[in-house]
Image (cartoon, rainbow, N blue to C red):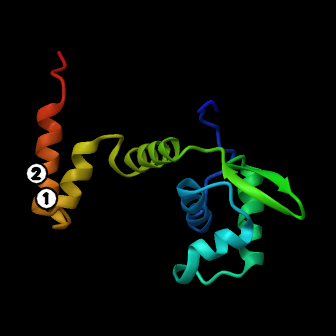
């Protein structure tokens, strides 16, 4: 049984690094060439580009590598939930003073909320415990 843990990332993860992390969160361990294949047409990166991104992620402590013959297999250390939480918190803090209501108001004003989104938000609000 493996232990789940979160890690502290030394530097922010770039958009390109995030694309590599998305692949590793879905399936791991993977070799660099498998990551290139998984990125497919969405990112037409060469293996050298992916290896550069992998090295950056290794240096940041977001992934780990294990030698497998002549290649390395990569796995995430940073859990997706921890990453999403930190990115969401950062966005809220930077743009909306840490408050969710102004974020929702912004998307509502920009007409970015569908009827389905609004119904889901109402359901989530209704399920919140009363805080006194």
* Secondary structure category for the residue under label 1: helix
Residue 21 or residue 60, whichever sits in front: 21
Q: Is residue 90 left or right of residue 36?
A: left
Which residue is tagged 1?
A: 116
Residue 29 occupies which quadrant of the picture? Answer: bottom right
Q: Is residue 83 left or right of residue 56?
A: left
Residue 119 is marked as 2
Residue 44 occupies which quadrant of the picture? Answer: bottom right
State whether residue 22 is above or below residue 64.
Answer: below
Furthest residue to the top? 132
Residue 78 is marked as none
Q: Residue at x 17, y 56 (%)?
A: 117
Q: Residue at x 71, y 56 (%)?
A: 57
Q: Residue at x 18, y 53 (%)?
A: 105
* Residue count near mark 2 (Cα–Cα under 10 Å), binned few <14, some 14–19, many ≥20: few
x, y percentage for residue 16? 60, 68
Residue 13 or residue 28, whichever sits in front: 28
Q: Could you give the CA–CA distance between mark 1 and mark 2, rounded to whole angstroms?
A: 5 Å
State whether residue 122 is above or below residue 52.
Answer: above
Residue 58 or residue 94, whichever sits in front: 58
* Residue count near mark 1 (Cα–Cα under 10 Å), binned few <14, some 14–19, many ≥20: few
x, y percentage for residue 32? 73, 68
Q: Residue at x 78, y 52 (%)?
A: 65
Instruction: Locate the C terminus by quadrant.
Output: top left
Residue 70 occupies which quadrant of the picture? Answer: bottom right
Q: Is residue 26 left or right of residue 121?
A: right
Residue 57 or residue 23, whichever sits in front: 23
* Secondary structure category for the residue under label 2: helix
């Amino acid at each position: 049984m493996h232990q789940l843990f979160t890690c502290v990332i030394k530097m922010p993860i770039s958009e390109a690094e995030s694309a590599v992390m998305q692949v590793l969160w879905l399936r791991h361990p993977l070799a660099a060439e498998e990551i290139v294949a998984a990125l497919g047409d969405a990112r037409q990166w060469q293996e050298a580009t992916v290896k550069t991104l992998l090295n950056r992620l290794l240096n940041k402590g977001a992934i780990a590598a294990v030698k497998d013959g002549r290649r390395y297999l990569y796995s995430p250390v940073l859990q997706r939930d921890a990453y999403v939480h930190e990115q969401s918190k950062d966005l809220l803090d930077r743009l909306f003073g840490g408050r969710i209501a102004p974020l929702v108001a912004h998307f509502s004003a920009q007409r970015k909320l569908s009827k389905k989104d609004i119904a889901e938000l109402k359901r989530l609000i209704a399920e919140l415990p009363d805080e006194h």
